[in-house]
């Protein structure tokens, strides 16, 4: 393996971990889809729908970021995959890679050696961010492959291009928080702090999106949540809302630029 | 040609505590091997990290090749090889992969030259770096600093962890750099290393520059100790009248003393006695170093 760039090195460093993660990310949704037919078009799903309808609205909101509808495979997938597990898998990989980018080099003590090469720190940030985006997209692709294979094998009626669109939206969400982790990492040079802060902000945004409609004082704030941009429009049913997708892309890009500027200005930890 | 390779003006880096460097004015000329000597915590690593733009000065500036260390950092680092004091390498790649990686980042990867240096140091470049011993990792660090024939080689405590045989190879590699007319800036707290390799030496302590000297002048200017051997015991007061000598110790037929200035008076007095032999004991840099630091601080040596 010949390493030629920071991007290549970052991709090379993480391929084992990301491959393992991709396998898991593909298998789990495949399992959901495989279960759908047996879960059934029959009485069970009706009962489950009734049960969910009886739940307090707040509780229901946490399960389903979009309207609760179990009568279609899309509705089922929205609840099982796109409300929580799917974005979580993408958030985990993006945040881990974002947090490890510059903070990982500084904590490992390799930053001095790397930056003694004729390369701008901003360039290092950009290339590591690119690797983070690539791997997040790859995990999203693995999820799609899992869903697609299971849908074909078990004869589940799903519009796979819409699944892809929803995963694009989820990947954008992941990359946004990966960018947040990148910024915190560039600022503090602490991997765990970067991971923790980004994850915490994601959790806050998740609850804001889920609960805002139920609490009148904060109902207007829902539009501030990246989770709302991700799923508020229900991309699985209605496709990608350009403004929302753009909002995620802009925040993610702004984070990369901010991380680069912050890291350019700071003393490298010795 | 005579423009300095490194020039600092009042270079200052203050940390919260006392660590750092204060008002450093330094000039390193092209083609010289410049030693940067001081005890641990004197600010050597801080200075080097300022030169490489890894940290930014509180005050003052550092120029390398006449370029500003921060603004022109990338252009400078195209021409510099660097060995960090606390070397941390990527564990999951082999030395070969690391050399190729950095070679490409520097846009001047010379596989043949790199292999030659690695071979001289007897380094197995195919093994994952995590499996290498400390000494072998240090070799990896040396190779990546020297490969591609950089115009300026900055070495922070280069012989740490190297066995004596490998140290000899390292000196030989430095001679090669010198023969090319390239420049070396190396820090050390080990005096014989500086004495062995350097043309000039700067002595730093607690963030301040104490002196910059030619290594040979430093040695010649220092006090010499002489040992005179006689055929028979000499009287204790035989040299009492000689003004240029100090610390006289008469021990039977052997007299030792320190000479500051011409030796004529000493030899005039000695010639009256049955003088057999005169030995000159050259001062080590340790002694010179201690002279700069004063008697109070022996920790440095």
Image (cartoon, coloured by chain):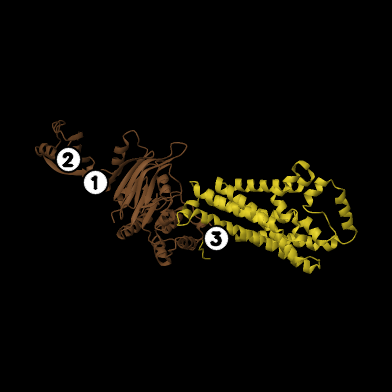
Chain colours: A yellow, B brown
- Mark 1 lies on a secondary structure that is helix
The residue under the point 75% across, 67% down is A149
Residue A116: image tag = none
The percent position of residue B246, horizontal first and vertical second, equals 20, 34
What residue sits right under mark 3 in the picture?
A7
Total numbered labels placed on residues in the image: 3
Is disc 2 on the same chain as disc 3?
no
Nearer the observer, A197 or B194 = A197
Nearer the observer, A229 or A196 = A229
Instruction: Classify residue A125 by image quadrant.
Output: bottom right
The percent position of residue A163, horizontal first and vertical second, equals 74, 63
Is residue B16 depicted above or below B87 in this figure? above
Mark in front: 3 vs 1: 3
Q: Which chain carries label 2?
A: B
Disc 1 and disc 2: Cα gap in Å? 25 Å
Nearer the observer, B257 or A191 = A191
Residue B217: image tag = 1
Q: Residues within 10 Å of mark 2 (few under 14, many from 20)?
A: some
- Mark 2 lies on a secondary structure that is strand
Query: Seen in the image, is B251 located left or right of residue A266?
Result: left
Q: Mark 1 lies on which chain?
A: B
Mark in front: 1 vs 2: 1
Disc 3 and disc 1: Cα gap in Å? 50 Å
Q: How crowded is mark 3: few (under 14 residues within 10 Å), some or many (20 or more)?
A: many
What residue sits right under mark 2 in the picture?
B228
Is disc 1 on the same chain as disc 3?
no
The percent position of residue B134, horizontal first and vertical second, equals 46, 53
């Amino acid at each position: 393996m010949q390493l030629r760039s920071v991007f290549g090195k970052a991709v090379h460093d993480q391929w084992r971990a990301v491959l393992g993660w991709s396998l898991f990310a593909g298998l789990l949704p495949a399992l959901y889809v495989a279960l759908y037919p047996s879960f059934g078009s029959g009485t069970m799903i009706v009962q489950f729908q009734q049960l969910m309808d009886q739940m307090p609205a707040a509780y229901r909101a946490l399960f389903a970021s979009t309207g609760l509808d179990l009568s279609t495979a899309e509705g089922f997938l929205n609840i099982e995959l796109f409300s929580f597990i799917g974005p979580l898998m993408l958030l985990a990989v993006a945040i881990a890679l974002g947090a490890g980018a510059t903070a990982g080099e500084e904590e490992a003590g390799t930053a001095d050696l790397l930056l003694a090469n004729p390369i701008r720190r901003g360039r290092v940030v950009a290339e590591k961010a690119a690797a983070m985006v690539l791997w997040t997209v790859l995990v999203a692709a693995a999820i799609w492959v899992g869903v697609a294979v299971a849908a074909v094998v078990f004869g589940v009626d799903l519009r796979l291009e819409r699944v892809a669109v929803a995963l694009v939206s989820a990947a954008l969400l992941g990359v946004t928080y990966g960018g947040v982790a990148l910024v915190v990492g560039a600022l503090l040079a602490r991997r765990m702090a970067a991971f923790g802060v980004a994850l915490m902000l994601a959790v806050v945004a998740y609850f804001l999106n889920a609960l805002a409609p139920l609490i009148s004082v904060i109902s207007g704030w829902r539009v501030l949540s990246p989770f709302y941009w991700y799923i508020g429009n229900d991309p699985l049913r209605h496709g990608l809302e350009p403004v929302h997708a753009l909002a995620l892309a802009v925040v993610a890009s702004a984070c990369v630029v901010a991380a680069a500027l912050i890291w350019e200005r700071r003393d490298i930890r010795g | 040609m005579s423009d300095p390779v490194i020039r600092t003006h009042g270079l200052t880096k203050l940390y919260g505590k006392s660590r750092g460097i204060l008002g450093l004015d330094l000039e390193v000329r092209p083609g010289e091997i410049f030693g940067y000597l001081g005890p641990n915590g004197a600010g050597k690593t801080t200075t080097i990290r300022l030169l490489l733009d890894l940290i930014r000065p509180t005050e003052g500036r550092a120029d390398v090749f006449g370029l500003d260390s921060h603004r022109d950092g990338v252009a400078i680092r195209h021409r510099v090889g660097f060995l960090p004091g606390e070397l941390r390498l990527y564990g999951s790649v082999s030395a070969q992969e690391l050399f190729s990686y950095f070679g490409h980042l520097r846009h001047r990867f010379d596989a043949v030259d790199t292999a030659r240096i690695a071979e001289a140091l007897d380094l197995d470049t195919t093994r994952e770096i995590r499996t290498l011993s400390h000494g072998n990792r240090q070799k990896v660090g040396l190779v990546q600093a020297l490969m591609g024939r950089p115009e300026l080689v900055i070495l922070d405590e280069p012989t740490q962890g190297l066995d004596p045989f490998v140290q000899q190879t390292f000196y030989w590699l430095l001679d090669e750099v010198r023969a090319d007319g390239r420049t070396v800036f190396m820090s050390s707290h080990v005096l014989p290393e500086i004495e062995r390799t350097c043309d000039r030496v700067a002595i730093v302590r607690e963030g301040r520059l104490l002196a910059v000297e030619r290594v040979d002048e430093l040695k010649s200017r220092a006090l010499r100790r002489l040992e005179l051997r006689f055929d028979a015991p000499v009287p204790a007061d035989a040299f009492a009248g000689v003004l240029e000598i100090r610390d006289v110790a008469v021990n039977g037929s052997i007299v030792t003393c320190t000479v500051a200035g011409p030796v004529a008076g000493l030899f005039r007095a000695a010639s009256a006695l049955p003088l057999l032999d005169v030995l000159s004991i050259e001062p080590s840099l340790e002694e010179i170093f201690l002279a700069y630091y004063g008697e109070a601080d022996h920790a440095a040596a």
